[in-house]
Image: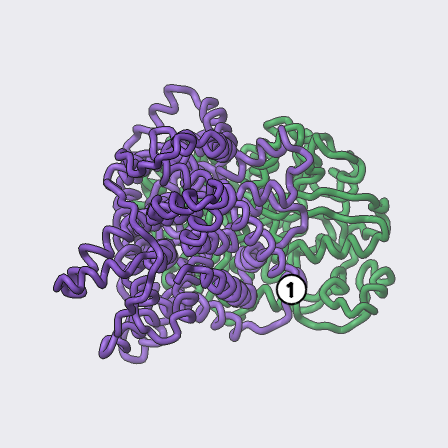
């Protein structure tokens, strides 16, 4: 929470933006109300049983395990995401656009596919062990447990930090760096004293998304046999302990709120600066090849391992299979349709919340902003069931239609748009829209013609995050999709669940291709960036 | 595996090849089986997979089906049916397409997910549930819906298609195919006679020390432990679990992996459903893998996949007739061929090196719905430190 009043706008009506406040409140309420089902269901658990459940040693232990997991994953994501963002924005790295897309793509790989592929490849008797067997390698070190869970989660969540940081670097005013350089700062000092403070809100936003993802992910800890909190919830759900599972999910929400508060505390003072002019490209020189190598290595490990494993199976088992597994182009169309609708809806809903939180910081505006994160931290099944309840009870006409499905996605992924947008608004100097006002623009005109172009990279960055994660969403999709509605990911799941792993390779490749193409479109739009 | 249950679970290309072989072997058009005349239509569309239903082909050789009731003798299906299926589309999608193509005026609106999640969904939807029929991989999920009062009576003539022990005694659901609990063993290490006949003797069997595998997170394993609790009591079950842990049991993610580890000699024996062994043998006929059965105890329970009509069904007759079709000779043969399950209708035999259903010795007096109490089992497994 930025406590300091950072803007001193002369205009009285901008101090009390009633319309904006109402819009933000409406968005926050819309995404939080369905979650009340959690409270309702958890209340069905008796108080004594509930207390016993949340304080028993296993619960405490797995909570600690989850904490360690979250801290390590977040740190690793920042360590990977920030340098990757820097070299793709601020340097003369060749084929920047290509690398940007490739580095962002691991976000669309469903974590169970990623984790499963890593176990198959690097397990004690996996593909690599078999390749190395002729050299006398009997068994590889264990990948299971914490190391494997951290590795896989990092590889599939670092794009959060990458994309948000990239947007910040893109819209940052580089004349400041030039100024620092003329003041005899080395490049590193200039980075530390100028760039870091400017990109910090964006890095924090990305880090927060990665942290909450790591906290609520089911698949990776399950496959890596790591006892995270979600595994306990999973076991309860599997045994029809719907109430207990929901109660435990509420506990997860409590942890989320704690993380959100902590992040607000350490976020500290956030500066507003003039945005816009980006020139200053660092010449990599002899670092060019190491930089390419770094980008290529990360992308290769995250993308090539799962695809390689799936393709290996595909090659080994080309045979007639169930006709239900035949691929239809319609699946790709459906995926893009819902993902694009969600990205659009989440951006529109995120705008007032992010703008209010950045421009008019107050306890209320930050409560609205933080509220949008709650749905993101609730495991997908739980959120899905909450909407099953609301949909079937109060919104029967749209139950099991695309409208409710997209609404579910928006609840799940809204903070990805909000976080990215808020970080962008913080970098816009309020003096600029004010200048436009003095030149006769209406408030909304100033917003559209001055502020919006300045935050475009953040806006498209947020939309890209929502788009990519919606492409891979599974649990809520399975619960809420219209009958017979199939997407790339449900198709991958159908093949995977039945053990036809090879058949999962084709839709997985198409998923990457379609996502990559869509990313290209999004990045081209970013050219709207002010020069 | 993100946050849904997969059943039947299976990893590895061998399983893939086995399943592919089961579906894909032979494409001789016009091979007659039951209902052959009605299938000429689908044959002409070149839809080979669907046309194979009722043809009796399998990786263990072709066969003729003579028993059971053909769909041609069943009431027609017409109208629209919303099916919540806990059985995967890859396994049952073809069968459903077959029914849709067989009748002019019949469509299914399917919703595929894991069985437990569909139960959670139906309970959450309450009386607004659009579901007509629920098709489940286990009796536990069927029992859970019955316990919540979300089912309705199936007609007696549908229930009578299977033996009494394979449908709900109150007539709320019926099994459609079955699976036996077995002990897969490595034939290089053990002879069939080395495997104890009594499941409770396993912890004291020194030959299994650090040489046996299980999959405690797998739902069929949990159903087996539930059966043990019902038959032997909680204390004895706890002791058994403790004993197995002291013996040094290796944990696997699911029972296909257990069976595969036994075939590879990684462990000498394990606990698994019968069909996992058959799936491995279908892909590797020379694998040193045998099937042993215990007798009259929790280790020999016979669980079923089944179906029920929901209390919210728009057209209960259509729902019941759909369930009836799942018990047709064609569907029964389809289950045997594609999933290596036990058909439940007499006259359609299981496929592979398996004893007939009459030679099995499942425990007496065990009601399959009792197996739905996985919650207590999970608690016990956790207490002992297995989960």
Q: Closest to the observer: A361 or B313?
A: A361
Q: Is residue A252 visible?
A: no
Picture quarter with the C terminus of chain B? top left
Quick one: which chain is purple?
A: A
Q: For residue A286, which quarter of the picture?
A: bottom left
Tell whether B299 sits left or right of B179. Answer: left
| The residue positioned farthest toward the front in the image shown | A439
Residue B67 lies, in percent from the top left, at 77, 54
Q: Position of residue A97 (x, y in %)?
A: 42, 69
In the image, farthest residue toward the left: A184
The residue at 51%/44% (across/down) is A348
Q: In this view, does B267 lie above or below B318?
A: below
Q: Which lettered chain is shown in green? A: B
Q: Disc 1 is attached to a residue of which chain?
A: A
Residue corresponding to mark 1 = A329
Q: What element carries label 1?
A: helix
Q: In this view, does A195 lie to the left or right of B327?
A: left
Q: Residue at x 41, y 29 (%)?
A: A16
Mark 1 Cα within 10 Å, few/some/many (few <14, many 20+)? few
Coloring applied to the structure: by chain
Q: Please give the name of the residue rendered at 52% of the width and 63% of the height, measured from the top-left corner.
A: A521
Asked whether residue A246 appears in the rendered view, the answer is: yes
Q: How many marks?
A: 1
**Looking at this view, is A345 or B268 the one in front?**
A345
Q: Nearer the viewer, residue A96 or A112?
A: A96
Image location (x, y in percent) of residue B82: 71, 42
Q: Is residue B250 left or right of residue B369?
A: left
**Picture coordinates of residue A114 (x, y %)?**
42, 60
Task: State the residue in front, A38 or B349.
Answer: A38
> Quick one: which residue is furthest to the top in this view?
A47
Q: Which residue is drawn at 34% across and 60% down?
A: A277
């Amino acid at each position: 929470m930025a406590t300091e009043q950072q803007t001193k706008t002369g205009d009285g009506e901008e101090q009390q933006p009633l319309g904006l406040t109402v819009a933000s409140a409406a968005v926050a309420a819309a995404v939080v109300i369905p979650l009340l089902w959690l409270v309702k269901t958890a209340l069905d658990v008796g108080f004594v049983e509930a207390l016993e459940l949340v304080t028993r040693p296993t619960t405490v232990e797995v909570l600690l395990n989850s904490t360690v997991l979250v801290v390590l994953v977040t740190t690793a994501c920042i360590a990977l995401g920030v340098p990757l963002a820097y070299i793709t924005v601020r340097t003369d790295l060749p084929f920047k656009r290509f690398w940007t897309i490739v580095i962002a793509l691991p976000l669309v790989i469903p974590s169970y596919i990623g984790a499963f592929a890593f176990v198959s490849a690097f397990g004690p008797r996996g593909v690599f062990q078999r390749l190395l067997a002729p050299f006398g390698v009997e068994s590889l070190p264990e990948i299971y447990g914490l190391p494997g869970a951290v590795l896989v989660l990092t590889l599939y969540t670092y794009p959060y930090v990458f994309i948000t940081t990239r947007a910040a670097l893109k819209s940052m005013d580089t004349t400041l760096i030039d100024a620092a350089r003329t003041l005899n700062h080395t490049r590193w000092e200039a980075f530390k004293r100028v760039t870091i403070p400017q990109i910090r809100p964006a890095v924090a936003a990305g880090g927060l998304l990665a942290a909450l993802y790591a906290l609520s992910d089911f698949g990776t800890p399950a496959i890596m046999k790591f006892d995270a909190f979600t595994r306990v919830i999973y076991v309860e759900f599997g045994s029809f302990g719907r109430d207990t599972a929901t109660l435990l999910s509420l506990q997860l929400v409590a942890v989320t709120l704690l993380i959100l508060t902590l992040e607000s505390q350490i976020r500290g003072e956030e500066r507003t600066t003039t945005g816009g002019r980006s020139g200053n490209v660092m010449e990599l020189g002899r670092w060019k090849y190491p930089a390419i190598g770094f980008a290529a290595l990360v992308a290769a490990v995250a993308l090539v391992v799962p695809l390689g494993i799936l393709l290996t199976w595909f090659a080994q088992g080309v045979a007639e299979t169930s006709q239900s597994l035949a691929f239809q182009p319609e699946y790709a169309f459906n995926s893009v349709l819902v993902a694009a609708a969600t990205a659009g809806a989440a951006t529109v809903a995120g705008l007032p919340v992010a703008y209010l939180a950045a421009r008019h910081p107050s306890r209320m505006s930050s409560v609205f902003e933080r509220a949008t994160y709650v749905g993101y931290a609730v495991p997908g099944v739980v959120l899905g069931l909450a909407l099953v309840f609301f949909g079937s009870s109060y919104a029967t006409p749209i139950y099991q239609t695309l409208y409710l499905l997209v609404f579910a996605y928006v609840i799940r992924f809204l903070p990805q748009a909000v976080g990215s947008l808020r970080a962008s608004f913080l970098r816009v100097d309020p003096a600029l829209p004010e200048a436009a006002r003095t030149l006769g623009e209406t408030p909304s005109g100033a917003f559209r013609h001055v502020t919006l172009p300045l935050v475009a990279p953040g806006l498209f960055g947020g939309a890209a995050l929502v788009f990519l994660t919606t492409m891979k969403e599974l649990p809520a999709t399975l619960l809420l999709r219209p009958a017979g509605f199939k997407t790339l990911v449900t198709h991958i799941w159908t093949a995977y669940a039945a053990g036809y792993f090879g058949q999962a390779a084709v839709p997985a490749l198409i998923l990457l291709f379609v996502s990559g193409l869509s990313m290209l479109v999004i990045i081209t739009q970013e050219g709207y960036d002010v020069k | 595996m993100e946050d849904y249950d997969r059943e039947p679970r299976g990893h590895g290309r061998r399983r893939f090849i086995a399943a592919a072989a089961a579906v894909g072997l032979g494409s001789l058009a016009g091979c007659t089986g039951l209902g052959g005349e009605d299938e000429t239509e689908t044959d002409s569309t070149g839809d080979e997979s669907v046309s194979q239903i009722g043809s009796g082909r399998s990786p263990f050789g072709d066969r003729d089906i003579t028993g059971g009731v053909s769909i041609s003798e069943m009431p027609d299906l017409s109208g629209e049916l919303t099916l919540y299926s806990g059985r995967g589309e890859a396994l049952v999608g073809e069968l459903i397409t077959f029914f849709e193509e067989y009748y002019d005026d019949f469509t299914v609106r399917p919703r595929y997910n894991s069985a437990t999640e569909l139960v959670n969904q139906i309970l959450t939807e309450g009386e607004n549930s659009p579901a007509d029929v629920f098709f489940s991989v286990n009796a536990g999920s069927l029992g859970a819906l019955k316990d919540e009062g979300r089912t309705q009576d199936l007609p007696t003539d549908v229930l009578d298609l299977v033996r009494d022990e394979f449908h709900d005694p109150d007539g709320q659901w019926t099994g459609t195919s079955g699976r036996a609990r077995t002990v897969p063993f490595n034939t290089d290490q053990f002879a069939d006679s080395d495997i104890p006949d009594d499941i409770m003797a396993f912890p004291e069997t020194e030959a299994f020390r650090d040489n046996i595998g299980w999959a405690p997170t797998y739902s069929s394993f949990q159903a087996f432990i539930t059966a043990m609790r019902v038959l032997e009591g909680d204390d004895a079950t706890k002791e058994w679990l403790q004993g197995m842990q002291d013996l040094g049991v290796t944990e696997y993610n699911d029972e296909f992996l257990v069976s595969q580890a036994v075939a590879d000699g990684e462990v000498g024996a394990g606990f698994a459903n019968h069909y996992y062994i058959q799936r491995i043998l279908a892909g590797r006929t020379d694998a040193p893998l045998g099937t042993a059965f215990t007798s009259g105890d929790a280790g020999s329970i016979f669980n079923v996949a089944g179906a029920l009509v929901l209390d919210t069904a728009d057209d209960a007759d259509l729902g019941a007739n759909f369930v009836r079709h799942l018990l047709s000779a064609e569907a029964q043969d389809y289950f045997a061929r594609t999933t290596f399950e036990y058909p439940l209708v007499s006259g359609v035999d299981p496929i592979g090196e398996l004893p007939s259903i009459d030679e099995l010795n499942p425990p007496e007096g065990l009601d399959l719905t009792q197996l739905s109490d996985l919650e207590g089992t999970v608690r016990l497994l956790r207490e002992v430190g297995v989960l």
